[in-house]
Image (cartoon, grey):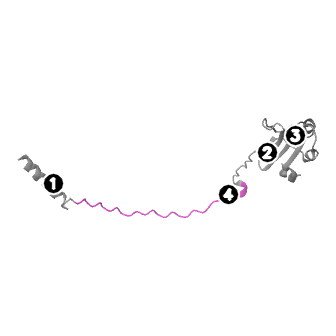
Amino acid sequence: MMKRLTFILLGCLILTGCTNSLPKAPEIPKLPKFSMPELPKMPKLSLPSWAKPKMPSIDVYKPTIMQGTILDIKEVNQLQLGMSKQSVMNLIGSPSIIDPFHQYQWDYINHSTIDGEIEIRYRLRLIFSGNLLSEIDKSGLEELLNSN
């Protein structure tokens, strides 16, 4: 008996779910249209140029940064093969890098920024045989040559 009642109740629910007899929602009343009144046009006010506020100008400080060895091309041109390490050091100064793996190679490297704009980069490589200068590589000095 319980099975029949459950079956009938389930059948009624299924059949009522398929019908289109849902109550209609009430219609929302339409609001009247409002419009904002036009405001009169105001004349543009402008101050004389002497009374207008001026923004202060801010200059960003860009320091001159010198990194490495600063070389003079005249002194570099005085280098000669066969010079001792001490005479090279007296002429152009101590190298920027003495590589422990290349003890006979001295590198003079410079990377400078002047006023945050002009960049100068160059490299001079000197190779020694024992204590005597055996090779001068000026291939990295193009910027130094062009600046003078």
* Furthest residue toward front: 129
Residue type at the position of mark 3:
Phe
Q: Secondary structure at mark 2?
A: strand
Between the residue at mark 4 and the residue at mark 1, the CA separation in whole angstroms equals 80 Å
- Residue 128's label in the rendered image is 3
Query: Secondary structure of the magenta portion, mostly?
Result: loop
Query: Where is residue 132 shown, x and y percent of the image?
Result: 91, 39
Instruction: Give the mark toward the camera: 4 or 1.
Output: 1
The residue lying at 66 percent from left, 59 percent from top is: 46
Q: Secondary structure at mark 3?
A: strand
Between the residue at mark 1 and the residue at mark 2, the CA separation in whole angstroms equals 88 Å
Instruction: Give the mark toward the camera: 2 or 4.
Output: 2
- Residue 111's label in the rendered image is 2
Please say if the residues under marks 3 and 2 sit with CB atoms less than 8 Å apart.
no
Q: Secondary structure at mark 4?
A: loop
Please say if the residues under marks 2 and 4 sit with CB atoms less than 8 Å apart.
no
Residue type at the position of mark 1:
Leu
Residue bounds of the magenta highlight = 24-50
126 lies above or below 36: above
Instruction: Give the mark toward the camera: 1 or 2.
Output: 2
Q: Is residue 118 magenta?
A: no
List the residue tagged with mark 4: 47
Residue type at the position of mark 4:
Leu
Between discs 3 and 2, the one toward the N terminus: 2
Between the residue at mark 4 and the residue at mark 3, the CA separation in whole angstroms equals 75 Å
Instruction: Give the mark toward the camera: 3 or 2.
Output: 3
56 lies above or below 47: above
Query: Where is residue 137 shown, x and y percent of the image?
Result: 85, 47
Between discs 4 and 3, the one toward the N terminus: 4
